[in-house]
Image (tube, rainbow, N blue to C red):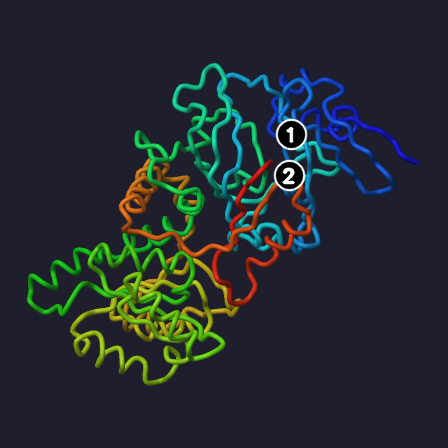
Amino acid sequence: MKTTLTPVARASAAAGRLSGFSARTTARLPSTLLRTSVTGPSLTFTRHKSGPYGYTQAKALVFSRFGEPADVLSVHQHSISPSLPDGAVLIRAVAVPVNPADVNTIQGTYGVKPKFSPLLGTAEPSVIPGNEGCFEVLSVGGNVQGLKKGDWVIPATTGFGTLRTHALVEDAEKKLFKVGGEKGKEGLTPLQVATVSVNPCSGYRMLRDYVDLVKLSVDGFAKGTASGGAWFLQNGANSGVGRAAIQLGKLWGLRSINVVRERDTPEKTEELKNELKELGATVVVTETEFLDRSFTQRLKDEWTNGGKDPLMLGLNCVGGKNAAQIVRSLSPKGVMVTYGGMSRQSFPFPTGPQIFKRLRFEGFWLSEWGKENPEEKKRMINEILDMMREGKFKAAPAQEVTWNWDTEEKVLKDAVQGTLEGFRSGKGVFVFGET
């Protein structure tokens, strides 16, 4: 039997409001807000393009249980009132990347599990995944001073829920960060803005916060013992973080040794090596070369001036044997910073190097750093955006997936699911068209 429902009367009855709505806003929603045709368990939505009473029609990817994205994600449609609460803004997605952490969150394997909420107006309590993206301000509430229509903004903190077409954001000037400060979006692309707040920031902080490599470089030159800038070593060098670290290191006068996995053919592997060298990598080796017993001797003989130039920082996002080789490669009193474990192989902290080489092992989590340093995070993002404007920093390659109003649910789900698959030509990024 076919039944006609309204989201206020049915989908939102238990919740009392829709995604992004305050209780007082929901109270003003008309019963004719949106009509949904239901046949059995499946939903078929009819879009009112102009929206009744000026309401904005919106869609979001949501999940109500943990699992693989292809299995648990679904598209949820809702409407947003044109009457904005004081302090709120209405934003529209322009470009939104999908990061491995987003997929891990959906799988339930990330460090923090989200709370499923009934406030989205879904049949079951749910969550919108996604942490970063570029959004455009469409309208602002009466008390909003620092944002205006047309501004580009990014979420100020993680857990925002970016895989959606639109959002009503209350307390907007705390939850959103205006792109570019006084310069605004001039000279920037949506892709640059959408991908600035996670990978480039992670690379920036890890190069700055654990070993003062710039000072090490200056001291080495002053003593006449250095053959160049200070060294750092990283695996996962083709990742977004790896590419950011290569470029920032080059800008800061540092030298880098970068480990990548072999590609399908020697030609493709060499092509990748050359690509990273063009970004500023000093040395690029394959994982096979890195894990070979001869590597530590090569490190000494070929690159570090017979061991006179110390290797004090290693960045690890792989784990397992790869991480163990970083430990063997570090100089005494060096630091290994772990920010991922893509191999899913355990890495026991070795007793000998901790004692006799006095190595230090640290973990880095950008989300927690950002909570503790919100103003520094804003300053850092603007600094990186300025580098992008000046052509000194390139965004990571992207696989763009168009998200229009009529884009099929399967296309969106497959794009999220594919984030952790094999060799990819770039990070998956939703680019929003007619929504």
Is disc 1 placed on a helix, strand or loop?
Answer: strand
> The C terminus appears in which quarter of the rendering?
top right
Q: Residue at x 24, y 59 (%)?
A: 250
Q: Is residue 246 above or below residue 27?
A: below
Which marked residue is nearer to the observer: mark 2 or mark 1? 2
Mark 1 surroundings within 10 Å by alpha-carbon count, few (fewer than 14), some (14 through 19), many (20 or more): many
Q: Tell me where residue 143 appears, x and y as whole percent.
A: 45, 15
The reply to whether callout 2 and callout 1 are in contact (CB within 8 Å) is yes
Secondary element type, mark 2: loop
Residue 55 position in % (x across, y down): 64, 23
Q: Which residue is disc 2 drawn over? A: 405
Q: Amino acid at mark 1?
A: Gln
Q: Residue at x 30, y 69 (%)?
A: 257
The residue located at (40%, 60%) in the rendering is 338
Residue highlighted by disc 1? 57
Identify which residue, 407 or 5, lies in the foreground: 407
Q: Quadrant of the N terminus?
A: top right
Mark 2 closeness class: few <14, some 14–19, many ≥20 residues within 10 Å: some
Image position of 231 with respect to 164: above or below: below
* Residue 145 shown left or right of residue 24 in the figure: left
| Count of all numbered marks drawn on residues in the image | 2
**Snapshot quadrant of residue 2:** top right
Q: In this rendering, would 123 be left or right of 87?
A: right
Residue at the far bottom: name it: 294
Provide residue 324's location: percent of width, then percent of height: 40, 73
Marks 2/1: CA–CA distance: 9 Å
Residue 300 or 349: which is nearer the viewer? Answer: 300
Q: Residue at x 41, y 45 (%)?
A: 197
Label 2 amino acid?
Answer: Trp
Res 34 → quadrant:
top right
